[in-house]
Amino acid sequence: MTAAQPSASGLRRSLRRRHMQMIALGGVIGAGLFVGSGVVIRTAGPAAVISFALTGTLVVLVMRMLGEMAVAYPAIGGFYEYNRLALGELAGFLTGWMYWYFWVIVVAMEAVAGAHILSVWWPTPAPWQFTLALMSVFTIVNLLSVRSYGEAEFWFASVKVAAIVAFLFAGAAFALGAWPGVAGGVGHLTAHGGFMPNGIVPVLSGAVAATGFYFGAEIVTIAAAESAEPERAVAETTQSVIWRVLVFYIGSIFLVVAIVPWNDSVRMARPYVSVMEALRIPAATTVMSVVILTAVLSALNSGLFASSRMLMALARRAEAPGIFATLDARGVPVAAILGGTVFGYVTVVMSYLSPDRVFAFLVNSYGTVAIFVYVLIAVAELRLRRRLEREAPERLRIRMWGYPWLTCIAILGMLAVVAAMGVIPEQRTSLLFGAVSVAVLLVAYALRRALRGPTASVYSGAGT
């Protein structure tokens, strides 16, 4: 079977190694890093580096678990199938729908965010027109083929990676006093109240807030079903997640707090632009706006891909309407893509008609849902690993480190994040709305069971 031919699932294995590598890299570098990190820094001070390191460690562990399961069970829907296989029908149902929900909200949010950036450059069109245009363009990109999605993501991720690498080199040169024209150094690490000016509690709350910034790295395990070399691609990308987290997140946050005063709220509203201004880089605002727009469009593109594949996986398990399982002649799940965009369009409309109610609820709930998904992934790995060691040890070509202790520590860490949300005032709303979303899914599952009985699988799911 060649890369362009369909797999047993009907999907085309058109994604090359370069696509998979950039999908993984792009999944780590989101718009939240460039914009939202300032919120964490204003709370924790320079110790925000620790906040991102704590959360990054959890993400590294989860990605290692995903790598182990993805190589052992390459499947459409990735961890949806793993959770279903390890934990049962309810866990699979919750995982699939929570993940779909997360990404369709991201699609809407990024479309709105992209429209705001474009409105600054071209103020004549109304923001909703830009939003509609962005949604339409990326719907078409995803409808063309999985290769068109991969190609778009390759170039978006290339811009983000090039930007963050250039930022790291320039920032490091400044910190070492080697940047021309300005006096460098890392004095801001301790100059304004010390490295941890507000104590340990803001550092821990910052770790909670930073959790959502990392979400997206797991997309590569979903894309594996449409990769020409699924096992190799997943193995390589999950192995490299450690240095990506260390370099891109922790390294860049370290440079931000070293170069810019953490207690300058104006500059921390756009931390990466402020660093570039400190380095006296011409047109810093415009350059970073282009990078942020690229990150936004990358998330929009990936959101449509991830949500459609998850909806298709749900449909193949009869946990969503069967039409979403269908593929066209090019191996594209057209109905599943359109299904996600319809909800996305509705959410975009709500962002303009009801920004303080409906849209606020959606935005506040989706981050907590992401944490719930990661917890279920870790619990699934804990159980599947035992089964693999007993029944098919030859499939364990990638192994979770320190099993089962590190897996248990990761689970406890993520549960601690959820518990912390209950005691941190700024996070309580998100936890409440996330819990409401999960409760709605539990009711939906109960109703589905009552009306249709247990799931009748229409697809084996174990492999592509």
Image (cartoon, rainbow, N blue to C red):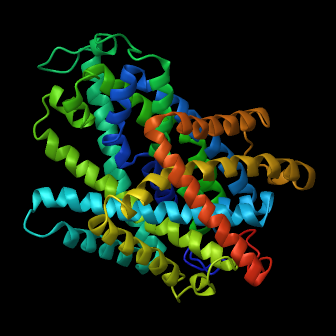
* Quadrant that contains the N terminus: bottom right
Q: Quadrant location of the C terminus? A: bottom right
**Up-down relation of residue 266 to residue 212 (above or below):** above
Q: Position of residue 353 (x, y in %)?
A: 28, 69
Residue at the (67%, 79%) spot, across then down: 316
Q: Vertically, is 384 above or below 182?
A: below
x 79%, y 58%: residue: 87
Residue 340 visible in this rendered orientation of the protein: yes
Q: Is residue 228 left or right of residue 85?
A: left
Q: Is residue 92 left or right of residue 180?
A: right
**Rendering coords of residue 115 (x, y %):** 23, 62
Q: Residue at x 58, y 69 (%)?
A: 310
Instruction: Choose between 131 and 301: the one closer to the eye.
Output: 131
Hey, which quadrant is residue 192 in on the image?
A: top left
In the displayed structure, 440 sits above or below 199; it is below
Residue 166 found in image quarter? top left
> Which residue: 11% across, 57% down?
121
Q: Position of residue 180 (x, y in %)?
A: 15, 21
